[in-house]
Amino acid sequence: MPVEVLPSGRLRDARANLEAVIDRARNEVTAFGRDLDFDAPVWDVTEHSTVRASNARQRNMLYFTTYEGGTSKSMNGRTPLTEPFASFVKALVRLRQEAKSKTPENHGTLIRAARYLHDTLADRGHDPCRFLTIDFQLAANVCKEREAETSRYRIGLFLVEIAHALNRYGISKARIDFRNPFARVSYDHTRIGKEHDMRRAEKLPSPEMLDALAQIANLVDEPSDVLRMRAVELLVCGGWRINELLTLPDDCEIEEEAFENGRPVLGNDGQPVFRYGIRYWPEKGGEPRVKWMPSVMVDLAKRAVRDIRHHSAKARPVARFIEAHPGRAYIPAQFGDGGPDQLFSMEDLGQLFGLARRTSRTQWVRRRKLPVQVIGRAWHVRRADLEAALLTEQPDLSRSPLPLRLSEYLFLVPLNLFHMEKATNPCVVAFLTDGQIRDFLGGRVQGSDRVPSVFERFGFTEADGTPMAMTSHMFRHWLNTLAQQGGMGQHEIARWFGRQDMGQNAIYDHASGTQYAEQVRGMMERGQIRGPIADIHDRLPPVDRESFRESVLATVHTTDIGMCINDWSLAPCPNHGSCADCGDHLVKKGDADQKGRAETLLDENQWVLKQALQEVEEETYGASNHVAHTRSIVTGLRRILEVHSDPTIPDGTLVHVNPATPSRYTDRPLDGGDPA
């Protein structure tokens, strides 16, 4: 007699909760539109997401599929997620969109995390009610094998979100107790070696690339090349995200008198100094900002904007006509305006759109499915039908997050300006897109379609003969690194690059420890360092000073309260976590961020010291050691703040604060000679 195993009450409740969540997401929630096909394996959410007109990727699709069959841009070869797991993931995506609108990329990452969980349920009918904590751990293990180190942490966050959803809605039979096993990637640029040098090189343009661009800037003469080259020059000036740059307003330039401490700044000639900036909308949201150009970049930026306006001069009147005449498309005045029934011959279309061959004209009409009138065996099209076809090709700004009309954008060009085979269409306005900049800097090979980069077209190659290739984001990394090397404050760097989190600065900082060390050695040589390390240097014979600098300043990296000069390539830090009391630590006088962090640490450690002293009074075992350590940290932090408050020390000076702990270079001989 067969034994039938009945589901437990807990499992029955979980399934009821799952069905309720799916039913609500399917029938009650309106996120992504009331007409959404909930059961479809792919959702087109294009109309429900914002996108800048310069973004070449205009469609947004969510694929509820497994990892089988790859990641093609269609369902060809893809395998849909198995029910009921698929409906659970779809419900989760739609509910989170209802709670707070998110980007398709954000939902896509959650689906990516869900794919790892999908395979763990294969032996249980892909039933979310049967999830166990170990399933999430197994999914994380597979994620670790498949994902790059920089992606694991984010996937782990979405695995945690899915676990919380299961617990919150009571869907799983057992509570899921799962934490993100992946640590946030620490962007430590103090490491040295071939691997880390290659990683930096992948993010930064090489000096040879920058030299090549400088030459190409004076070689380009085609309008499409000039326009893209000027866009690249603005990237060099301002380090924008690419779609921030390509959606600049036409009236982007800001020029105003510079003030300092409430007084106008005067130049060497006694005349007021003016600063020049470019207004833009941050890609990640917020009010428009002004990015002030460094003085050395002002002339380059002004020329770039001037040339861009020149090459967009033909497209801007077209945009203004469309705005002034809703429902009408622009057709040059030379063709007259005979009303909606005016007929255009194939010769007229050839002249209008630069179509020299008869077959090109007929193909143009057929692709747009225009009605034709045959007069004497010759095709003609009505003006109303022609204008309707042209309007469908105009940019769609309905999903743009910016409050700009079409004519108010800077980068406007006639359609097909960048197409090598299609003739330019003067009746339709287009944007310079991120894809066109990508092709310009890096080229493209897609099947039989090959687009050479500007480097390849002008014969600039790497040392091994391969064509140079860049990305638009390299300039952002490069400028950020220059700012770090130049000593710009972290707060100022974050503001200038349009970031909300100063912690993101480190991701873009690719200066190596040896590069920082070279700067600090220069400061020591110029007498811009104070303290015992500088005193030892100055007491040495001049012939030995260079060896001393190279020995004790082999590598340098920044900390939140100063600079560390310990050579990590020789040995790990012996005082990790105790920078304030370290003999290998320098303080940059006047750095507001470092001073603020030191003040915060002092408050925290004073509180810790107070608690430790109470433990000593209560004769807690080992408390005296903790008191001694914390007291040394407090003393070091006070010494650091004294440096920041000392009016006799110029801002920007590096000060060796002479803590009690011995430095690694004290009494160390140079090159085997006598101790210094």
Image (cartoon, rainbow, N blue to C red):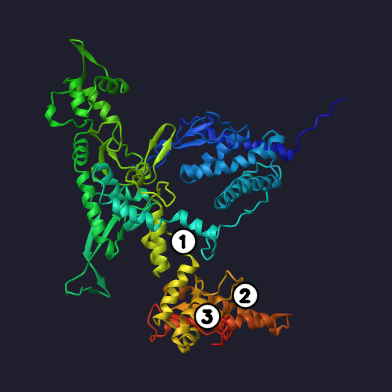
Residue 298 in the image: above or below residue 339: below
Q: Amino acid at mark 2?
A: Pro
Numbered tag placed on residue 580 in the rendering: none
Report crowding for label 1: few under 14, some 14 to 19, many 20 or more residues within 10 A (C-alpha). Answer: many
On the rendered image, what quadrant is the N terminus found in? Answer: top right
Identify the secondary structure beneath mark 3.
Answer: helix
Tell me which corner region of the image, top left, top right, bottom left or bottom right, holds residue 375: top left
Identify the secondary structure beneath mark 2.
Answer: loop
Find disc 1 in the rendering and name its residue. 510
The first of marks 1 and 3 along the sequence is 1
Question: Is 29 on the left-hand or right-hand side of 611?
Answer: left
Identify the secondary structure beneath mark 1.
Answer: loop
Numbered tag placed on residue 574 in the rendering: 2
Residue shown at 46% from the left, 32% from the top: 34
Number of numbered callouts drawn: 3
Question: Is 544 on the left-hand or right-hand side of 307?
Answer: right
Find disc 3 in the rendering and name its residue. 637
Question: Is 51 on the left-hand or right-hand side of 71?
Answer: left
- Distance of mark 1 from mark 3, alpha carbons? 29 Å
Q: Amino acid at mark 3?
A: Leu
Q: Amino acid at mark 1?
A: His
Give percent across and percent down for residue 396.
32, 37
